[in-house]
Image (cartoon, rainbow, N blue to C red):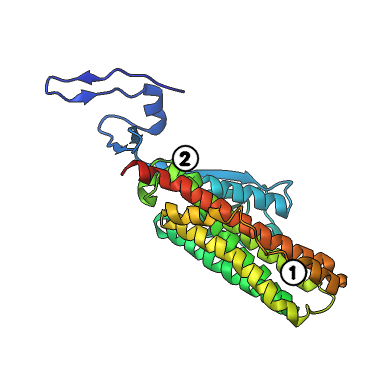
Amino acid sequence: MTYRRRVQVTGGGTFLVTLPKEWAGRMGVGQGTEMVLIPNESGTMLLVPPGIKDRNRCTLAVTGKDRDHLQREIIARYIAGYDVIEVIGSRIGPEVRRVVREIAQSLVGVEVLGETQGAVALHCVANVRDFPAPATVRRILEITGAMWDDAVAAFLSRDEELAQDVEERDGDVDRVVLLVARQFGLLLRDLIVEEEVGLSRFQFLHYHTVVDQLERVADHAVKVSHAARALASPIPARWGGRIRRAAAASQDVVREAVGAFTGRNVERANAVLAGKGAQTHLGDWLQALLADHPADAPSVTLLHDSVLRCREHGFNIAETALDAAVPAIDSI
């Protein structure tokens, strides 16, 4: 619903705007209530009544939901920005409580802070100020880079233990990615968060996009680890150098693109994108390796595909870097 009010001016030159009665009643606003006014870069003004954050809670019925369904529902509310998610049911058994606790542990800043026979209350205690977006992007890049190094090493040595370790680290990336999604959800719902985060919703959209691309890079490291565990025999040593160089070249694109994004460096982003149409030799080894090692064609092909796809994700990040730099260029 949209309300329209005409501005009034008192004899002393003060501007006055009346508040809709039904809204004021719903928000508990009355005579003497202190309001907070927050100007926005777009020129709008946000009017914040007291106690608004106390309303940021929701309930979720557990009846009829299996583990995956319950997890999706909790994560959806976490991303939406709710501070309190109360899982309710006529009687919540030990198994469901265990599942709810495990889901809470997979989300940054979520704690079980209350339990009764018919409810489990999850509280998100993480402060958005404690997780600045630039540092988050750098952290995810660091994790994904290490995952790729180890995934390639596991593939070349057929090291199942190292491959499994890479797969487990994907959970660390997922947790941080969900945190960024939550921050973005909060920004979309509440302009107050812009001041806490230090970024506008428009600016944070670019960070959300970059994080999404980095998550996919991490997913490809997991795919390479799966391929490593599926190998029938170790890859011949003479192919190790070519595979490492191909993977390193792909990851260089990702790192350069992220550097261009975080540094708002248009020239660096364009330099990355200049290589998009250039002739590459990342796959020159594929056919020869397949001929030399036919028994493991599925694993080798998956590795090759993941190397090329990560490169494409790097180009996507470089394009986002150009988009993110536009406001800075216009302001010069």
Using the image as rendered, state which of residue 140 and residue 298 is in the foreground: 298
- For mark 2, give the secondary structure: helix
Residue beneath the point at 47% across and 40% down: 189
Question: Quick check: 177 above or below 170?
Answer: above
**Residue that label 2 marks:** 189
User: Splitting the image into 4 quarters, where does residue 128 fall?
Assistant: bottom left
Judge left or right: residue 22 versus residue 286: left
**Residue that label 1 marks:** 285
Mark 1: few/some/many CA within 10 Å (<14, 14-19, 20+): some
Q: Position of residue 38 (x, y in %)?
A: 31, 39
Using the image as rendered, state which of residue 220 and residue 310 is in the foreground: 310
| Quadrant (top left/top right/bottom left/bottom right) for the C terminus | top left
Residue beneath the point at 47% across and 41% down: 188
Mark 2: few/some/many CA within 10 Å (<14, 14-19, 20+): few
Q: What is the residue that sits farthest to the left in this orientation? A: 12
Sequence order check: which comes first, mark 1 or mark 2? 2
Residue beneath the point at 67% across and 54% down: 92
Q: Position of residue 241 (x, y in %)?
A: 67, 77
Measured in 3D between alpha carbons, the distance from the residue under mark 1 to the one under mark 2, in whole angstroms, is 50 Å
Q: Which mark is residue 161?
A: none
Q: What is the residue that sits farthest to the bottom in this orientation? A: 237
Judge left or right: residue 96 versus residue 194: right
